Amino acid sequence: MKHKHLRPPLVVRALARPATLLLSAAMFSISLAQDWQLPKETQKFKPGPGAELATSNCLLCHSADYVSTQPPLTRTAWKATVDKMRVKYGAPISTNKLDELIDYLAATYGIRADARGR
Ligand code: HEC
């Protein structure tokens, strides 16, 4: 009796090829890595006047989470943090934008001025 040559299913043939295996392994680890990324919006600064200053000056070395996970700080404390970023870590922030930037941080991630800390 004559056997017809049976072609293995496509998946089996694909798995038998080492290059395909490597590729699917790589794609699998990429998708695993993506599972561990934070949701995009927590990596951004909240909108508001001066937000673009934070975006352009504060994301060079770390994410916006460093700011958003702080407890609400007074303006004085935000000023001290920004000064530390500049003096200690060398953040390149133009001095004529400092007040606007600190105002943004205090207004957005701070204790309200009428509470205390102005
Ligand atoms: C030149 C690099 C750099 C830039 C630019 C920078 N930071 Fe940082 N920042 C750091 C480093 C380094 C740390 C400390 C990280 C650690 O301790 O793990 C830090 C930590 C922080 C923290 C955590 C609390 C603390 O005091 O350590 C906050 C809040 C923060 N940065 C805010 C800001 C803000 C706001 C800006 C923009 C004005 C900014 N950073 C820009 C380097 C930078």
Image (cartoon, rainbow, N blue to C red):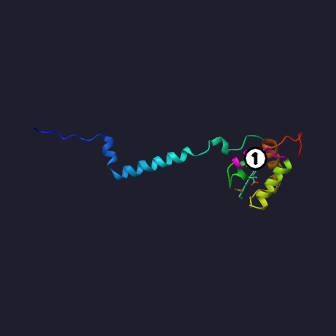
Image spot of residue 82 (x, y percent) = 79, 54
At a point 21% along the width and 40% down the height, the residue shown is: 6
Q: Secondary structure at mark 1?
A: loop
Q: The N terminus appears in which quarter of the rendering?
A: top left
Is 72 part of what is drawn in magenta?
A: yes
At a point 65% along the width and 41% down the height, the residue shown is: 41
- Between residues 69 and 59, which one lies in front from this camera angle? 69
Image spot of residue 108 (x, y percent) = 78, 42
15 sits to left or right of 88: left
Magenta-drawn segment: 64-74
What residue is shown with label 1? 70
- Determine which quarter of the picture holds residue 60: bottom right
Q: Residues within 10 Å of mark 1 (few under 14, many from 20)?
A: few
- The mark tally for this picture is 1
At a point 72% along the width and 52% down the height, the residue shown is: 58
Image spot of residue 19 (x, y percent) = 37, 52
- Between residues 70 and 24, which one lies in front from this camera angle? 70
Q: Is residue 81 above or below residue 111?
A: below
User: Mark 1: is the Cβ under 8 angstroms from ligand 1?
Assistant: yes
62 sits to left or right of 80: left
Helix, strand or loop: magenta stretch: loop
Extreme residue in the left direction: 1
Is 75 part of what is drawn in magenta?
A: no
Identify residue type, mark 1. Gln
Residue 51 visible in the snapshot: yes
Query: Where ligand 1 lies, by quadrant?
Result: bottom right
37 sits to left or right of 25: right
Residue 64 visible in the snapshot: no
Q: Is residue 79 above or below residue 116?
A: below
Image spot of residue 27 (x, y percent) = 46, 47
At a point 84% along the width and 46% down the height, the residue shown is: 74
